[in-house]
Amino acid sequence: MKRQFYPVIVLCIGLMSAQIVACAHVYLSNLNLLQSIEAVVRSGYLAVPNALVAGRLDTLATAMAGGVFFTLSIGSGLSLITLCTVWLWDRVFKRRRREALLFLGVWLTALYLINASGLNLIASLYLVVVPLVTGVAAIMLLPVKTTLLSPVTVLWPVSAALLLTLIWGMVLDARLFTNIRDYLLLPTRVGERVAKAYYDYTLYPAEAFKSLSQKQIRTCVIKEGMDRSQYLKLEKSMRRCDYLPVPDGYPADLTIALDRETACFSIANGESRAFDVTAEELFGKPQQVLERFSAHQDRNRMFRRLSLVCLLIGFPLVLYSFIFALVSALPILLFPARQAIAITSVICICIGLILLAPVYRGYSAVRSPEDLIAGLSSFSYATRIAALRTAYKQNQDISKQAAFLKLESSPFIAERYWLARCLAYSKGAQTRVLLRRLAGDPVPIVACQALWAISKRKDRKMIPQIIDHINTTPIWYIQMYAYRALRTLEWVQPRSPLASY
């Protein structure tokens, strides 16, 4: 029994160490964001996230929930790699020093790469704490009598994992994750809660390792020393690029000052100068200058890539390990070890097939029914979603059919959000009414897609409602989409009353 649960116990210890680091990571990021929001609000700008979200930024609960993303991505990957490394070193390489030095070299190389763009303390903490804690746990808890190549411990579970990978490869295409969301997650209460947690907490960890160019609102300080016309032109240009000018002394992501000796503008982060640009560059191509500054300040480029790889590969394997251990709890009590592992592998394959069934139905659903009305009113959930996808892909106006069938009131989330996307290309009189209702939908994904559709329709009359969404909704994700819609509709932050010359 101890041998069966050894991988899960070690992985749990590694994930807990990652969660501790992740909680601190997100908490510090949230505090920095809170300072920026306060500067934005005091300067008279529209803040995203709003006060409802800002009130939760300094709480430990928010940091812990947001930190789960890093735990399940970078934490899963590092824990799994460390566990496998310890097994290889102990069972295959017999704890030889040469192989230990090889693994140490790989680890140091990863540390170097993560800091290649500049010192990144928090990312380095993940690569130091998680492997060390997981490695110590893996060595201390290592079963005495187990071989790496034993069919009992490796062959059956690995074979089951490979078989499931091949089976799921049948539906592998660009729409795989969308199909999983539409046909596996959203139709179930458990999946709906998973989706809700994603929209409630994903942006907190995302904010922690985004580059400046990826953030929605930034602050800047324009130093005195330039003439009035230059200041006003630069202030307007920065607002158009969502770098909001705040008074000197407020927390700022960017500082711009004129060097009268060289007649160039210095671009800096506080007192740390990044580079100088000419007036022609700054006023003629401000977006390029800001992109260059963002790249100069970005310390998380490699960390983002590593987190993505760990999320796509490490997390599924860790999840499989947990499910395998959980399922094996009963067979291991009733059958000999070899038979119990074989039975568990078969059960895991069956679970994978059960989860695949709804995704495959969506994958193989009729994608372009000849009669769109028939497709939209079909008794088959998969066929209705396929019809909506087809209407969206072909830019068809389905506002009349949607109003007749009352699709905006559908009990199925995926139907409502695909309807919202389709309405981006609708010209009917009832389209605005439908989008208003969908924009107020309690499910974030529906509201977000409705706001996206509003922006695509270039409906500037909806700007007041969009601003109201930003000020009143407690969900940051919806605020993000609402602000994107405003910017697509060419709305620009008003000039701050504190911005004077």
Image (tube, rainbow, N blue to C red):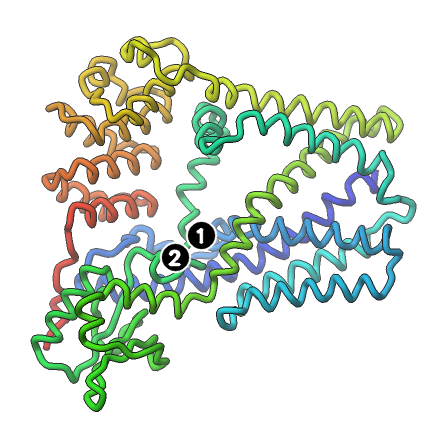
Of residues 108 and 445, the one drawn nearer to the viewer in this rendering: 108
Q: Identify the residue under disc 1.
A: 62
Of residues 58 and 272, the one drawn nearer to the viewer in this rendering: 272
Instruction: Please tell me whether mark 2 sits on a helix, a strand or a loop.
Output: loop
> What amino acid is labelled 1 in the image?
Thr
Of residues 479 and 170, the one drawn nearer to the viewer in this rendering: 170
Quadrant assignment, res 450 = top left
Q: Local crowd at mark 2 within 10 Å, few (<14), some, or many (≥20)?
A: many
Quadrant assignment, res 414 = top left
Q: Quadrant of the N terminus?
A: top right
Q: Is residue 255 above or below residue 165?
A: below
Query: Can you give x and y, in whole percent of width and height, for residue 309 in the image?
Result: 56, 49
* Disc nearer the start of the sequence (2/1): 2
Q: Residue at x 10, y 71 (%)?
A: 232
Query: Can you give x and y, in whole percent of width and height, for residue 72 in the image?
Result: 57, 47
Q: Identify the residue under disc 2.
A: 57
Instruction: Please tell me whether mark 1 sits on a helix, a strand or a loop.
Output: helix
Q: Residue at x 84, y 44 (%)?
A: 148
Answer whether labels 2 and 1 touch (C-beta < 8 Å): yes
> What amino acid is labelled 2 in the image?
Leu
2 relative to 373 in the view: left or right? right
